[in-house]
Image: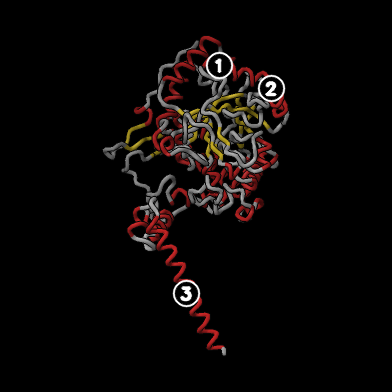
Amino acid sequence: MLSVFSVSFGVLLAFTLAIVIAYFYLRDITQKRHAILRNFPLIGHLRYFFEQLGEYFRQYFFLGDREERPFNRSTRAWVYRMAKNEGGVLGFGSTYNLHEAGALIFVPAPFAVLESERLPTPPLTIGEGWCEKPFVARSLVNISGMSFGAISQPAVRSLSLGAAKAGCWIDTGEGGLSSYHLEGGCDVMMQIGTAKYGVRDADGRLSLEKLREIAALDAVKAFEIKLSQGAKPGKGGVLLGGKVTEEIARIRGIPVGRDSLSPNRHLDIANTDELLDMILRVRETTGKPVGIKTAIGGWEFMQLLSETIARRGLDAAPDFIAVDGGEGGSGAAPQALADHMGLSIDEALPRVIDALLEAGLKERIRVIAAGQLVTSARAAWALACGADFVNTARGFMFSLGCIQALRCHTNTCPTGVTTHDVKLQRGLVVEEKCERVANYCRNINSEIDMIAHSCGLHHAREFRREHVRLVGADGRSTALNMLYPYPRREVF
């Protein structure tokens, strides 16, 4: 009886399988969208399967430690070690190619600074003398703008708690201020994006009343008006509807489940005069420092800005400029813009610094650099160029456990960093990850100081361009102050 049943079940299973195969065969051979499936039904699916897997196979098996984009395995491993407090020591020599174009080489002092001679890197004040409540910023490296929405609730909580432990600030990103940004008690920089999420009225315009409410919070230290970001200059923020939960919709003031698409620029800012008008309006309303974030495409913007400030006076100037390189990241960006729009931070940062030096504005305006500056060496390079601070988003994402799965926009992030799927968020344990955030911040600051001491400097704020050399296409290095000579300073 049992054998008869087994035979019958086997026949039924084979018959069912044959029907399924026949169905998919007929569907493939009659569909008109895919030539491969039409010509090679069934087995043609292997092509798409391996194409999808290829991205991950290359990451783990085929690409070398220094080859992958946007961040190679060696860089990610360095951040992971910093976040786990495992140190940055290696054996048998570096795999970093000192002969490759763009390689960074710091100039060692013949007599390095002794332990007893080292000084703590001093904090810098943003907006001192120009607003009621200037911001004393303690950390060289800080958390760049990542909206609650682009990243998950446990990710924001971990960053806030970790930032408080390490003494750095967290930028809210353009998605508005949430309770999770405030949870850790860290310093917060509130970003005002083109859609003015969190500070908008019913018509989407800037609400001074909401601005005052946020400014009344002690944790909120400064406001950043975002003109553009490196990954997509000229394109507003994109948060796909699948990630617009009820909570996120409430914070942003938009409908649930609908794509959150910011305008490609501020509707009330069309020139440098209107930009300075906005800066003054926000500063007068909040009493706190106000700056701008922008990608750079050449000299024109900084020249126009400097000329407008010269005409209107230093009180109209932004308290800081956050320069975002074209290699900056984003939760979602059109590839055409991400690949081709905006100067790299390597070129944009020296141009901005030089423009401020020429106009005599460098002491008035603090400069924050961003754009794949996730390691101590890259951060030290930015300081040598003239930046006052360094922002990184993806460095801190790696400290949270990001594995560069490239799924930030799909709501399927396997580490829980950029998804609102609670099952996937379970992998991100806030109590553990906030410690890694703090470790990464402390350790990268410490290594920046270590590089400074090796250059014969007492602390990292003494970096200058002559302390760095860049390797050219011919394999020879040139001092940064020769590539970008310090311009003559002019004073109003």
Classify mark 1: helix, strand or loop: helix
Q: Are marks 1 and 3 in contact (CB under 8 Å)?
A: no
Give the image location of residue 53, x and y in percent. 42, 57
Q: Which residue is mark 2?
A: 208
Give the image location of residue 385, x and y in percent. 44, 30
Left or right of 461? Residue 351 is left
Mark 2 Cα shell of 10 Å, populated few (<14), some (14-19), many (≥20): some
Mark-to-mark CA distance, 3 and 2: 70 Å
Disc 1 or 3, which lies upstream in sequence?
A: 3
Vertical side of 275 occupied by 179: above or below: below
Q: Which residue is mark 3?
A: 15
Mark-to-mark CA distance, 1 and 3: 73 Å
Q: Residue at x 65, y 38 (%)?
A: 249
Left or right of 21? Residue 477 is left
Q: Which residue is mark 1?
A: 274
Residue at the farthest bottom position = 1
Q: Residue at x 37, y 57 (%)?
A: 37
